[in-house]
Image: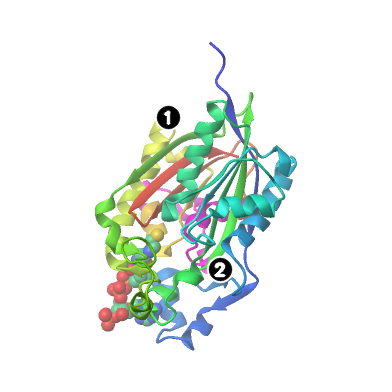
Amino acid sequence: MNKKTGVKISGTGSYFPKKVLTNADLEKMVDTSDEWITTRTGIQARCIAQQNETTSDLAYHASVEAIKAAGISAEQIDLILVATITPDMFFPSTACILQTKLGLKDAPAFDLLAACSGFIYGLSAAKGYIESGVYKNVLLVGAETLSKITDWTDRNTCVLFGDGAGAMVLSASEENDDILSFYLGADGSYADLLYLPGGGSAHPATVDTVNEKLHTMKMFGKEVFKVAVPKMALAAQKSLELAGKTPEDIKLFIPHQANMRIIQAVAKKLNISMERVFVNIHKTGNISSATTITALDEAIKMGKLGKGDLVELVAFGGGFTWGSALIRI
Ligand SMILES: CC(C)(COP(=O)(O)OP(=O)(O)OC[C@H]1O[C@@H](n2cnc3c(N)ncnc32)[C@H](O)[C@@H]1OP(=O)(O)O)[C@@H](O)C(=O)NCCC(=O)NCCS
């Protein structure tokens, strides 16, 4: 029997819009305070896309960087996957729009929706396509412009989210096996705790849906928090178990950046000290599918990871969905 094709993480990249919205800025927009936001969430600032800046624009910049880091030409990409809950439009997919921006033709391209777990769901898909020998170089992107589906009058949600994109090139390899394991889960009975009701077949856009603000995110934060912590801890444990590893084997734990208190609670459950937990939520806010990949890219750029280091990515989001992946850098 032929040896199974391995998967190599060949490059990563990220991109953030230039405009930064601080907690002080938010104090002028809604009844909130820097003190409340910082102590409850750990967020101090977030990047916000310009009005004419789209999710595919952010995805493009992150992708160019990841392709360069991979040392391949864009033409060698033979599959494009974009995880997003804020596509440029319903269809065509943001992945197709990105394909054209990258100057590519013919490579299959599609979007994947698993909310904040989207990048990890995407990793599992990329792994499957490469290991089965179907594609050799997969471009996987997590990109969001959450500012465009945020109700800027709702202090419960508008302080939490930001915009940004991260990208990874995964390649077929004889030597590497960089995605050691993954674990995915979902529970649709929680759908109405974190969602965007308007615009789909349930509530097609009308003047009423606009007036009722159905085109912006709705969230019951306390309930989300309660489920997020145990599910993220479970997911983290499962992918470690599947790879026969323990928390001690991980160089860096990179959890979804939704709330500093969620991150601390999950780390505590796993008995991982905060020194081994990568956190950049203070300057990004929650960027849904882009959080784990942009944090990973930043950790690599900061020199926090050496060749062969094990990293665990864990996420949780709308759906609810959750997932983890144990990867080697
Ligand atoms: C949203 C979240 C930060 C709120 O923190 P919390 O400690 O649960 O706060 P509560 O919901 O109990 O709200 C406490 C009070 O603060 C108020 N409040 C909410 N947002 C506020 C803000 N931005 N500024 C000031 N006060 C605010 C609430 O109105 C409430 O006031 P009340 O007691 O008079 O009703 C927290 O629940 C959370 O992060 N949940 C998870 C959200 C998440 O991660 N979503 C994405 C998952 S991928």
To which residue does mark 1 refer?
Answer: 244
Q: Nearer the viewer, residue 49 or 198?
A: 198
To which residue does mark 2 refer?
Answer: 283
Residue at (56, 77) in percent of width and height: 21
Q: Position of residue 65 (x, y in %)?
A: 70, 52
Reply yes or no: does residue 280 show up in magenta. yes
Q: Which image quadrant is residue 133 in?
A: top right
Q: Is mark 2 within 8 Å of ligand 1?
A: no
- The quarter in which the C terminus is drawn is top right
Residue at (67, 52) in percent of width and height: 100
Q: Mark 2 against mark 1, which lies toward the viewer?
A: 2
Direction from residue 229 to residue 89 in the image, left or right? right
Direction top: furthest residue:
1
What residue range appears in magenta?
Answer: 268-297
Q: Which image quadrant is residue 212 in?
A: bottom left
Q: Position of residue 257 (x, y in %)?
A: 47, 59
Q: Amino acid at mark 2?
A: Lys
- Seen in the picture, residue 269 relative to 158 is either above or below; the reply is above
Whether residue 127 can be seen here: yes
Q: Position of residue 309 (x, y in %)?
A: 58, 39
The image quadrant in which ligand 1 is located: bottom left
**What is the distance, in whole Å, between disc 2 and disc 1 at their CAs?**
34 Å
